[in-house]
Amino acid sequence: MNKGWKKYHNLNIDKNEFQLLYNKHGREYCKKYYNITSYKFYDLLNKFNIKLKDEKQTTIDIKQLKIMYFERNMDVKDIAKKLNISSVYLYTILKRNNIIKRRNIKTNKHITKEMMIQVYNNSKNYKEAARKLNVSLSWFGRHMKKFDLKPRLNPKGISRSPKNIKCFIDDTGRKFIYMPNHKRVIGNYVANAILVMEQNIGRQLNEKEIVHHKDLNPSNDNINNLLLLKNRSEHSKIHSKIYKNNEVN
């Protein structure tokens, strides 16, 4: 491996040479030798009809694969893990067996923003909503961002309907107030410390500003315990100093 480096797009790769290198040195050597990605490597295996070394004892049931991929809406990573293969090689199998990727199926195009909101509000989480819409989890996440829909908070033991909750306290003791139109909203809620600081200084905080609790108790939102910082960098420096002092002591 010295002057033998070659570029995939400028090269007609010889099948015998490729097979010899693969059998002798393995996948990683071939990828470096030809300067190709994992996807291109598996594409060449498919092109030359060369079996993977680990594939000799592994047979993949295409019917079972289709059930997991389409009917159960499992993620590619989960399917690959269950079949004990890489995600890249799974895509090669899909391509080899002419299985259309879910994102290319036209049936997903009828799903509107209003439909996603309705299904998501009546579901426990992303996975359940994706299952109801018969789409993958990654597809659902991408379209949540595309439609500019923010994930809701998940307070334990409290109804998810914002009409029934005006405020709640999370596991760390931090208090959140229901204010869906606020600039710093996260899932229709704003941290109470932010509201206390805004009331004290007479303006809304920008997106970079951070409210720090001096006594490190997130449930203590007394104005004397709050410190306004310009950005996360300042906040991290304060916590690193506290951490170092605790280590010394």
Image: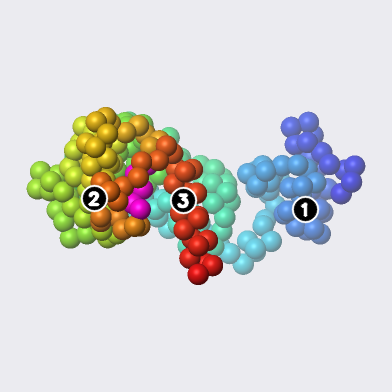
Question: Alpha-carbon distance for marks 1 and 3?
Answer: 47 Å
Across and down, in percent, residue 215 comes to 34, 57
Q: Which residues are magenta?
A: 210-214
Residue 91 seen anywhere in this rendered image of the structure: yes
For residue 104, above or below residue 123? above
According to the picture, the residue beneath numbered tag 3 turns out to be: 238
Crowding at dot 3, Cα within 10 Å, few <14 / some 14-19 / many 20+, comes out as: few
Type of the residue with mark 1: Tyr
For residue 44, above or below residue 208? below
Q: Residue at x 83, y 48 (%)?
A: 17
Q: Quadrant of residue 5?
A: top right
Type of the residue with mark 3: Ile
Residue 121 seen anywhere in this rendered image of the structure: no
Question: Alpha-carbon distance for marks 2 and 3?
Answer: 19 Å
Work out whether residue 223 or residue 159 is closer to the camera in this orientation and state it: 223
* Residue, far bottom: 249
Q: Residue at x 62, y 67 (%)?
A: 57
Q: Which mark is residue 222?
A: 2
* Image-based side of 196 in relation to 65, left or right: left
Is residue 36 in the magenta section?
Answer: no
Is residue 213 in the magenta section?
Answer: yes
Across and down, in percent, residue 103 comes to 42, 37
According to the picture, the residue beneath numbered tag 1 turns out to be: 29
Q: Residue at x 67, y 56 (%)?
A: 51
* Image-based side of 145 in relation to 39, left or right: left
Across and down, in percent, residue 229 comes to 40, 40
